[in-house]
Amino acid sequence: MNKMYDLAVIGGGPAGIASAVEASVLGLNDIVLFEKGSNHSTTIRAFYKDNKRVDKDWKGQKVTLEGNVHFMDGTKESTLELFDALIAAHKIDVRFNTEISSVIPSDPFEIHTAATETFKARNAIIAIGYMSKPNKPDYALPVTLRDRIHFNLDAFSSNETVLVVGGGNSAAEYAHYLSDQNAVTLTYRRDRFTRLNPINESIIMHHAGIGKIRLKIGTDITALIDEGGKPRVNYANGESEIYDRIVYALGGAAPLDFLKKCGIELGENNIAKHDEFYQTTTPKLYIAGDIIAKIGGSIAASLNHASKIVNHIKSREKNTATDKDD
Ligand SMILES: Cc1cc2nc3c(=O)[nH]c(=O)nc-3n(C[C@H](O)[C@H](O)[C@H](O)COP(=O)(O)OP(=O)(O)OC[C@H]3O[C@@H](n4cnc5c(N)ncnc54)[C@H](O)[C@@H]3O)c2cc1C
């Protein structure tokens, strides 16, 4: 059993890093941050394309920052640099390559790693996002097409026919990025885009207008078939097309198994029940970031969760100390 921490943060993305930073600024003493990847911000590294524009008001949500992390519009690289600098400046004790398997709801919490180490902490914040498991479509994905079906942009080259599937900002940005060097079709089952922020909407409409991106909207995909090593896509409207590659941008699945293992009660839409300070029904156990919002999360919103949570921990501890003095 390792030493006792004032605060353990699970997940080294924007919400987790900001939680550790706010805790350091507000004077919590022993803080530890666990990240399963070999570096922080795995979602940003894996799913943002290089040089991606990072919008503070992502999805058009205007968020006024409340805490001590000064995040602004930038790029993937400037955002990662901001978090690098914060971790260094606040000397955050980050344990990389450390996947947490559960947080046992005891007092203090027992935090178990997948490698069977155990840590103890008086307060814990779960900030593991939901991109560890990207959503897949309902129809079968042939295993023989494994190298041609993607969930991020890691394996793309040029001069290929590419189908981007999804109606959100990630799908729009993937389509725009790929259209520079490939023949891109963007498909969405609804007949119009309702979730795009104004910048992405205007980019997509402009590129569709000049023929750089082909839109195929208002029809669902019914099946994907291996046709001589390439994906043949059958659409509900009876059309069928072959592409070199497909990339799905369908968001991610909430980490329900993890939350249940931590004894967290789930409420509406399978989001953990929590109070206005993001404290779950287990006292001193909080959730932050995308797992609160699921659809519609953003970096700025995650930073504000962190600030609110840590202020709550601090004021709770102050009240406890005052009660003892009385
Ligand atoms: C393609 C794309 C583009 C986006 N563009 C923007 C944008 O321009 N502006 C914006 O504000 N938002 C954008 N977003 C949304 C933004 O990335 C998220 O809102 C934000 O990353 C949420 O932060 P988080 O800390 O809650 O979760 P995440 O960033 O997902 O971080 C969770 C971290 O927890 C780690 N983790 C998971 N499970 C465990 C475990 N069991 N143990 C230890 N560590 C674990 C993960 O490895 C990860 O590093 C975009 C999202 C995508 C997918």
Image: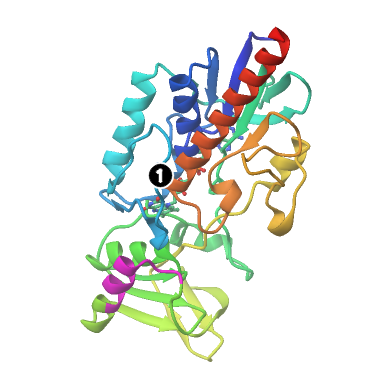
Please give left or right for residue 20 compared with residue 86 in the image: right
Residue 86 to residue 184: above or below? above
Please give left or right for residue 287 compared with residue 70 in the image: right
- Of all residues, the one furthest to the front in this rendering is 326
- Percent across and percent down for residue 39 are 42, 30
In terms of secondary structure, what is the magenta stretch mainly? helix
Q: Nearer the viewer, residue 16 or 310?
A: 310
User: Could one spot residue 119 in this view of the protein?
Assistant: no
**Residue 198 included in the magenta stretch of the image:** yes
Residue at label 1?
44
State which region is magenta: 195-205
Three-letter code, disc 1: Ile
Please give left or right for residue 109 compared with residue 151 in the image: right
Residue under the point 61% across and 18% down: 318
User: Could one spot residue 250 in this view of the protein?
Assistant: yes
Please give left or right for residue 248 compared with residue 316 in the image: left
- Percent across and percent down for residue 187 are 44, 76
Q: Nearer the viewer, residue 227 or 250?
A: 250
Q: What colour scheme does the image use?
A: rainbow
Q: Is mark 1 within 8 Å of ligand 1?
A: yes
Residue under the point 45% across and 40% down: 303
The total of numbered circles placed on residues is: 1
